[in-house]
Image (cartoon, rainbow, N blue to C red):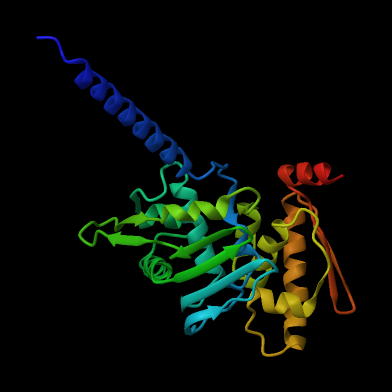
Amino acid sequence: MPIPSRIFTRLEERNKRSAVQSQGMEVEQVRSLLPNWSDSVRRVPNVALRSALFGAMGKGERPYVERLEIHAQGGVSILYTGVMLDQLDLDVWETVLHMVRSQELGAECRITAYQLLKELGKTDTGKNRKILSGQLSRMKATALQLRVGDYSYEGSLINEVYRDHGNRTKSYVIRLNPKLLTLFESDQFTDVDWSVRQALRGKPIAKWLHGYYASHANPFRLKVETLYRLCGSQASSLVDFSKDLIKALDSLERASNSAGQPFSYAIEGDLVRVKTTPSPSQRRHLDNKL
């Protein structure tokens, strides 16, 4: 018996809607993927490099805060709830982003403690596993309200962390919020050289400076006091921070130059002037401006 024309028309319309919805899901999946990058760098949202969100802090107890306004470069607004984070936490978050970049954000990423520690350049010991577990828990418990220009994000740095305690390798299942993708829009991220960052191990201010200056194609002069606030240093005074700053800049200069990325600085009164080596994308940005 032939299908009545009205039923046939409805079937065609439903099939078209299904096809459009399927295409929309495919587009959405593509949009949920982080832009890929090489193993030699860690791609980081600028908001994490141009603020005290991951502070240049030393060892010791860190306070828990609620809706604290984090010092950040102009045009960036951050309200933070959780235990204050440091540059070691940033190492872990960068590494998690690095390891999930080939899959859709929001999907489960299964990874072992051994793999994470290896990527971090650390040995697989009970002590390091315990520290790593604490860092993942801290970032799971964060609550952020970020605004960067026209983009905003509200959520945690890590959405979910599951642990397989019965597995000798201690595997993790980590899930990130797909909305984190908004922090990788346009020019809102930087590729940070991982070898230089690793060379600055144990030097939190130098690590912070490396990320901050890497995020600028042509760094402008800044007051020492501005860097003091932006990096989240725990120095008791500006005088003490100034001494720490010189040591950190010296360390960054040595590490960068050793990696073939010329870096130099000068302190003129209360201003810090820095000359860096722009990345290829930053060179194109500077050429476009010219």
**276 lies above or below 283:** below
Front in this rendered view, residue 185 or 279: 185
Asked if one can make out residue 172 in the rendered structure from this viewpoint, the answer is: yes
Residue 44, given in percent of the width and then of the height, sits at: 58, 55
Front in this rendered view, residue 204 or 28: 28
The picture quadrant where one finds residue 113 is bottom left
Residue at figure coordinates x 39%, y 70% from the top left: 127
Residue 171, given in percent of the width and then of the height, sits at: 30, 55
Front in this rendered view, residue 210 or 120: 210
Q: How many marks?
A: 0
Image quarter (top left, top right, bottom left or bottom right) of the C terminus: top right
Residue at figure coordinates x 65%, y 71% from the top left: 72
**117 lies above or below 236:** above
Asked if one can make out residue 121 in the rendered structure from this viewpoint, the answer is: no
The picture quadrant where one finds residue 273 is bottom right
Residue at figure coordinates x 42%, y 55% from the top left: 116
Q: Is residue 245 left or right of residue 185?
A: right
Q: In this view, does 177 lie to the left or right of 91?
A: left
Residue 214, given in percent of the width and then of the height, sits at: 70, 57
Q: Pick out the residue farthest to the left.
A: 1
Front in this rendered view, residue 89 or 29: 29
Q: In this view, does 123 lie to the left or right of 206?
A: left
Image quarter (top left, top right, bottom left or bottom right) of the N terminus: top left
Q: Pick out the residue farthest to the top.
A: 1
Residue 40, given in percent of the width and then of the height, sits at: 60, 46
